[in-house]
Amino acid sequence: MKLKTVFLLLLCLPIWLKAADNPIIKIETGNISLIYQVADNGRLYQRYLGKKLTHNSDFYYLPQGTEAYITHGMEDYFEPAIRILHNDGNPSLLLKYVSHTTRQADKGINETIITLQDDKYPVTVKLHYTSYDKENIIKTFTEISHGEKKPVVLSKYASSMLHLNRAKYFLTEFSGDWAHEVNIAERQLAFGKKEIDTKLGSRANMFVSPFFQLALDSESEENNGEVLVGTIGWTGNFRFTFEVDNENKLRIISGINPYASEYTLAANDVFRTPDFYFTYSFEGRGQASRNFHDWARYHQLKAGNQTRMTLLNNWEATYFDFNEDKLISLMDEAVKLGVDMFLLDDGWFANKYPRSSDHQGLGDWEETKDKLPNSVGRLVEEAQKKGIKFGIWIEPEMVNPKSELYEKHKDWVIHLPNRDEYYFRNQMVLDLSNPAVQDHVFGVVDRLMTQYPDIAFFKWDCNSPITNIYSPYLKNKQSHLYIQHVRGLYNVLERVKAKYPNLPMMLCAGGGGRSDYEALKYFTEFWPSDNTDPIERLFIQWGFSQVFPSKTLCAHVTTWNRNTSIKFRTDVAMMGKLGFDIKLEDMNTNEQQFCRQAVNNYNQLKPVILDGDLYRLVSPYEGNHTSSMYVSKDKNKAVLFAFDIHPRYAEKLLPIRLQGLDKDKSYHVKEINLMPGASSSLNGNDQVYSGEYLMNVGINMFTTQQLNSRIIEITIK
Ligand code: DGJ
């Protein structure tokens, strides 16, 4: 070492020694480190986020980084995480470290709480982190409280603020509309801000989903490169802000969308933000998805470790046009298909304004006597006699103006008292900030379950965003509406879960308008889209699979896109949670027989498809084909799906190289789900290969046939 260097090092030593005294706070999982340190000014800085650092002695060399939870009004010139207006009109905040605690919450799960306080005002901010060691997920939220005499006003209140300092940032968002959900678009971030947000209130992610992928240095890849994937657990307005500053540093601020939502916080009340969850993968998007899938199944989803039921839904088979006899004969079809359950959809309720279309009846949750003279009870009994379960559709948060509920309880409806009403799907949103409305919504489930305790499943729909935005209940606190509405929903869902802990429920919002991990604490699955055209579904399922495991993704065989075969439609649906929404008369005998066999196959493969590791092999966005596979945790079983969408004439076809197998195990490869009487044209079908061969050489799964599909069962020999 040169003398000059030694001299410099000695000069720095006191600074390092001093810095070494300041608390270092490590939030760690198996692969990730998020490191904070208190600086000499008493403030908290994020010094590192990335691949796990295991040598504590290195921490002192880390750059100081950026303040962890930046406040408004101090020396930072970009977007803050929090803004608070004090009693004296001062809108600034300066947070200093007070203490932190870390405890093991469970095996492999650690919780850290960092407490920060302003030294001029009695404001406390607690940053919470839960790290899931094995799944490499970090969950964060913030608690804000104060001891000022009068309430303070919060106009920003992030769940999380993260900092990155890299050469390039590539953001992927998932946007769309009804029947056109989760379209994937990636773009490079440049100086300035990009926001992904929603202001829809309910049906919150009709236009954009509450998750993102952020690739570092180069565009995201499926199996390589660093990607941070984040999602917010909030079934309402959310916002992600990505801001690149003058030094090309990036901050990511995630939380409730503060739009039109200034929050007045009384002394000693705690404002608890929703949870933000993120993972950091060093092997591309694929590993990030698997991290989320595992974490969801083990730690977050309702009945995450349990299987799911196959079903026949009557929605597309009948729409509103049904009666008891028709439903009972559809149950017979469910039995023929071999599914577990019959699901009765919209249209079974209301008498003064019977629900014969979506123009009326919503809110009046009594069976329509003309349609169901013997009530839902008869249907439940019939289903039981036939050996299947019975599930039912509700949309309890909403009301049609043409309903008795609206006539009796206009004060329960979110509406502007002095303006014409604006309707979305002919309906309006009930004011869940009002406890009486919460009782009503809970009562919809509770009445049905009390009267018919054998109902085995609910599909909970939500077809409208909040329109006519004014809460009769909140009066002069209108800026609390978006937040209190969601909290009211959670109160109801909490009550439902407490009273009916084993009741599976599907979350639906006019298709995929609701899909977030807080809601999925209360729901076993969700309806990704009303679009069940299997080609579209290949894209939609690909999109949602980035964050959600297959057991949450309801996938039904319907008559959308009759140009595709029943086999193609069923093969696509078998990649998720299989169901049918079709009449048997829409299929010939051969096709019906095929579907029965497919349900059988699915039942055998459920443990792999629903609980295995997903490997997305060929993206539908990249060409004319797509393929994915699921591998059981012990690597003894796998299922491979392949689809030819629009192959080109004389196109060069390459084998698909599989992933996730054990290279030293031998696997039997067999095409299944063939039409009755058909034999496999797969080259190398019914042979045994090593995992090494399958992963390095691969199998020729694709064809030049339009709309062809294949499912391969791979079993250890
Ligand atoms: C929208 C849902 O997405 C559909 O599946 C169906 O349940 C209808 N609502 C019923 O109105």
Image (tube, grey):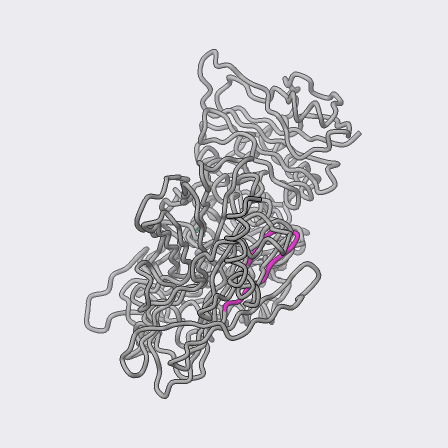
Residue at the (25%, 61%) spot, across then down: 422
Instruction: Answer whether residue 640 is magenta in the image.
Output: no
Name the one closer to the observer, 82 or 4.
4
At which x and y percent is residue 114? Answer: 53, 69
At which x and y percent is residue 636? Answer: 75, 36
Q: Is residue 577 above or below residue 10?
A: above
In the figure, is residue 373 to the left or right of 156?
Answer: right
Q: Is residue 109 above or below residue 294?
A: below
Quadrant (top left/top right/bottom left/bottom right) for the C terminus: top right
Name the one closer to the observer, 244 or 63.
63
Residue at the (19%, 68%) spot, across then down: 419
Q: Is residue 512 above or below residue 699?
A: below
Of helix, strand and loop, which mostly describes the magenta segment?
A: strand
Name the one closer to the observer, 193 or 459.
193
Residue reaching furthest to the front: 3
Q: State how many labels appear.
A: 0
Instruction: Please tell me in which quadrant of the rendered image residue 170 appears.
Output: top left
Residue reaching furthest to the right: 717
Residue at the (74%, 32%) spot, across then down: 715
At which x and y percent is residue 94? Answer: 38, 72
Name the one closer to the observer, 625 or 566.
625
Instruction: Answer whether residue 129 is magenta in the image.
Output: yes
At which x and y percent is residue 283? Answer: 57, 39
Is residue 27 visible in this depiction of the protein? yes
Is residue 360 visible in this depiction of the protein? no
Write the start and end of the magenta stretch as one range: 127-138
